[in-house]
Amino acid sequence: MLVMKDDIIEKLGEDVERVGFGPRYNGKNSLKGRKIKILDSTLREGEQFPGCSFTNSQRVQIAWTLDFLGVDAIEISPIISRQHMEACKKIVQAGLNATIVAHGRALRKDIDQALECGASFAALYHSVSDIHLKYKLRVSREEALSRTLDAVDYAKAHGLQIRVTLEDASRADPEYVVAFAKELERAHVDRISLPDTVGIMAPSGMYNLVKHVKDSVNVPLDVHCHNDMGLALANSIAGLEAGAEQVHVTVNGLGERVGIADLAQTSLALKVLYGADVNVRFNMLFEISRLIEEYTSIPVPNSAPLVGGNAYKHKAGTHVAAVLRNPKTYELVPPKVVGNRRRLVFGGLLGKTGAEFLLRMFGIEAETETKKLVSGLKDLGIDLFELELTEEMEELLKKEQDVLNKVE
């Protein structure tokens, strides 16, 4: 799906005033100009988040929305229930631009269900770490490989494209991982996914894991990083820098335990900080975040970057004054890029410039009133109210910037 380029986001990296010397510190990177594919797993991984579930109509609506947003692939697991099977069928039949990936175990019966729902691309997973093989599956390394290859051969014989996920690869013997990947290459798999299943990786470790496999096989690689230590985004990008081509994300970072990399954060970081070619309608990110919040009743934390309630909320007097004069002072990405809104907090930390702006909204320009307002709010010592800047208010602010930027 071709998503029209957003002039604002395209020019962010060229806005010297906005980025300052940041790019010099960041230095060169291997992602600049590279096409990075986004696989959204909200309908599979996301439903593993405690308390998260969708109706079938919601699943179809989410798939449509994700497709319009521009993700390259959408993952769903038809093996979970008849409802999931029906949802997968409807999504496959919808004729979306995104690749629909039917997710299941490396078992023939799971492949049969992928075929039943009409999918042309299936994702199979099998654990490769010794701890999983011993306690979860109770099979040997040889049996794990044999079972996976049997499933791949069966899927290929039925005309499916296949991705194999080496579950818990980040805790597995590196030589076994490479040997497994080489056998998958001989079996003509279309993609291999390297997950950090429990968040054991530091970014350098994820880079090394992906590079180790990338140097050994000529198969496109995915990265799927869990956020147990808060490093899912950093590890995902490290894996992409090492040569992976597709990153797994979910809306609001939902997933098993504490989730995986977040769609909004991952796509914006790749575009703005790394200059990667990401096929996303960024101005829909806030909207889809709130759609998932509505469907799941799982609140988006106010502290969530980009789409959270505090992402563009300014409180400290000096911050408010600076933002009123030039929002670039404290905003790397303008709120409208992601569909969010700028908000100002009026309370005990308010300064003179913020008070002047508030009074001007009411047509009051007396300096004595400004001093009274600031003094009164400081005496209260609490956040009295917030002001969301509508488009009309933003336009008014632009007209009055010359006044706000006057030399005091």
Image (cartoon, helix red, strand yellow):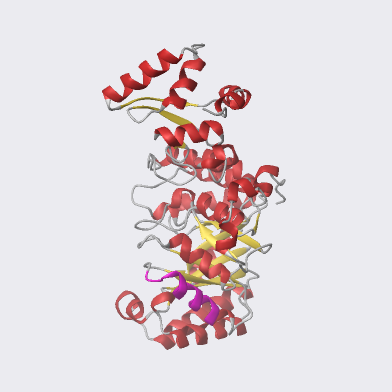
Observer-nearest residue: 183 or 301? 301
Observer-nearest residue: 33 or 158? 33
Residue 166 visible, this orientation: no
Query: Is residue 345 positioned above or below 118 on the image?
Result: above
Number of marks in the image? Answer: 0
> Based on the displayed image, in which of its 4 quarters is residue 28 positioned?
bottom right
Q: Where residue 61 sits in the image (x, y, percent)?
A: 55, 41
Q: Where residue 389 sits in the image (x, y, percent)?
A: 52, 27
Q: Where residue 394 sits in the image (x, y, percent)?
A: 58, 26
Observer-nearest residue: 120 or 173? 173
Q: Where residue 209 sits in the image (x, y, percent)?
A: 49, 77
At x 60%, y 41%, the residue is 337
At x 61%, y 67%, the residue is 29
Q: Main secondary structure of the magenta part?
A: helix
Residue 374 visible, this orientation: yes
In reply to whether residue 201 is colored magenta, the answer given is yes
> Based on the displayed image, in which of its 4 quarters is residue 310 positioned?
top left
Stretch of the chain drawn in magenta? 200-212
Query: Is residue 156 positioned above or below 359 on the image?
Result: below
